[in-house]
Image (cartoon, grey):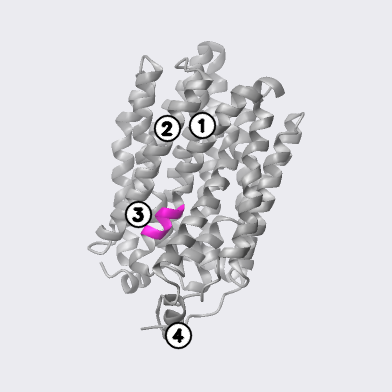
Amino acid sequence: MSVDAAGRAGNAGSSRAYRNFVVWFLALIYTMNFLDRQIVSILGKQISHELHLTKTEFGFLGGTTFALLYTTCGIAVAYLADRANRAWIIAFACAVWSLFTALCGTAQTFAQILLFRMGVGFGEAGGSPPSYSLISDYFPAQDRGKGLAIYSLGVPLGSMIGAFAGGKIAVAYGWRSAFFAVAAPGIVLAVLMLLVVREPKRGGLDVVIDGAAHPPPPSLGVAVAGFFANRTLVLTAISSGLSAFVGYAGLVWNPQFLENVKQMSEADVATWYALVLGVTGVIGTYGAGWLVDRLGQKDRRWFAWVPAVAFALSIPFWIGVLWAPTWQLAILFIAGPALLNNMYLAPALTVAQNAVPPARRTITGAILLFVLNLVGLGVGPVYVGRIADAMEAEHGANALAYGYAALLPVIGLTILAHIAASYSISRDRRLAAILPG
């Protein structure tokens, strides 16, 4: 077991300031990525009214169709990114998803906006997996959780900005203008990405196991088979998928739940929900990365225990959301899941990036996202929407509350999945060499 000395020297040649600049710049791009992905949930009431969508159709629009393109294309893009310049791929992807976000504002039918959302998913497939790999070559193993947590701040920040800016623009100018406005910054960031982010040496900061150098990138079939033969990765993917199931269901439906069930105005959603989403999400996402970098050095199982504990603590908050008599109280209870249900992502990404050799990182991240988004984004919103549609005839606007109540058993399964992952993490040979806790 050794370290790639030449690579360490090359990657260490990047100053701490530049390393931090890169990860924060990537986090900014991810913020726009997630903003473009999630803004449809903020605009859902206006879109559904104008295009005459059922809750099931909106669930497909907000989750399933996007997830199908995002997950399947992500694996192909990741295979390329393990062999090509990752910064260029991220820049191209950013330009593509921004263009299709703008096109969503031109849609006249459900079929058109569905097609454009699929285009957004295609573009965003090239964003996160190459970014995970790039960050892992700028941050050594003991700091990787922090680096990936900073990047993951794009989730709550994108959600917050989307809820605030998208909501305010939609109230003032309509939902189409909101799509145009949030798409424009992505084109600028795509150009800047080409100019300011350098491609580091792959694996330059990593321990070499069983050899004098890191192995080369495997074929796509070998990489996929290797992922599903690795118990740690499979259990991490399952637990992350269930976590995302709950998280995305809330992200897609919270605005309409607050408006229809708790009688919160669109303007108040744009202000107060956005604020809660951003502040709590940042604390939960960064806090999880900070915690696992420290606790994981003592016991690697904390990479799974942290999200397990967080989801257990979220249960009473979900119950409070359902029973809150006013939107003001409901928004306070939503702060709990918004913080706690974000605490799985940074630990899962850190495990996945450390559990494989450097040449497999991008494809491994893509497969993890495939499972996470197919289960979470692809099924979670539709699950809640289908239950709400089934209950609508009898319960009217309160039907969404029954969809939310049906998330509680899923949370129980999520906790069990994280506990199962902890046992595999503690026995993983590569993780033991890199994270000897």
Q: What predominant SS class does the magenta segment belong to?
A: helix
Crowding near pointer 4: few (<14 within 10 Å), some, many (20+)?
few
Amino acid bearing label 2 = Leu
Between disc 3 and disc 4, whose residue precedes? 4
**What residue is rendered at 31% in x and 43% in y?**
310
Mark linked to residue 164 = 1
Nearer to me, 427 or 34: 34
Q: Quadrant of residue 219?
A: bottom right
**What residue is rendered at 30% in x and 50% in y?**
306
Number of numbered discs visible in the structure rendering: 4
Amino acid bearing label 3 = Gly
Image spot of residue 31 (x, y percent): 52, 47
Mark linked to residue 289 = 3
| Residue situated furthest bottom in the rendering | 212
Crowding near pointer 2: few (<14 within 10 Å), some, many (20+)?
many
Image spot of residue 159 (x, y percent): 50, 38
Between disc 1 and disc 3, whose residue precedes? 1
Judged by depth in the image, the label closer to the viewer, 3 or 2, is: 2
Between disc 4 and disc 1, whose residue precedes? 4
Give the magenta range.
146-151
Amino acid bearing label 1 = Phe
Q: Which residue is disc 2 drawn over?
A: 275
Give above or below for 322 relative to 375. above
Decide: marks 2, 1 in contact (CB < 8 A)? Answer: yes
Q: Which residue is disc 4 drawn over?
A: 6
Q: Helix, strand or loop at disc 2?
A: helix
Amino acid bearing label 4 = Ala
Q: Quadrant of the N terminus?
A: bottom left
Decide: marks 3, 4 in contact (CB < 8 A)? Answer: no
**What residue is rendered at 48% in x and 48% in y?**
154
Give above or below for 247 relative to 291. above
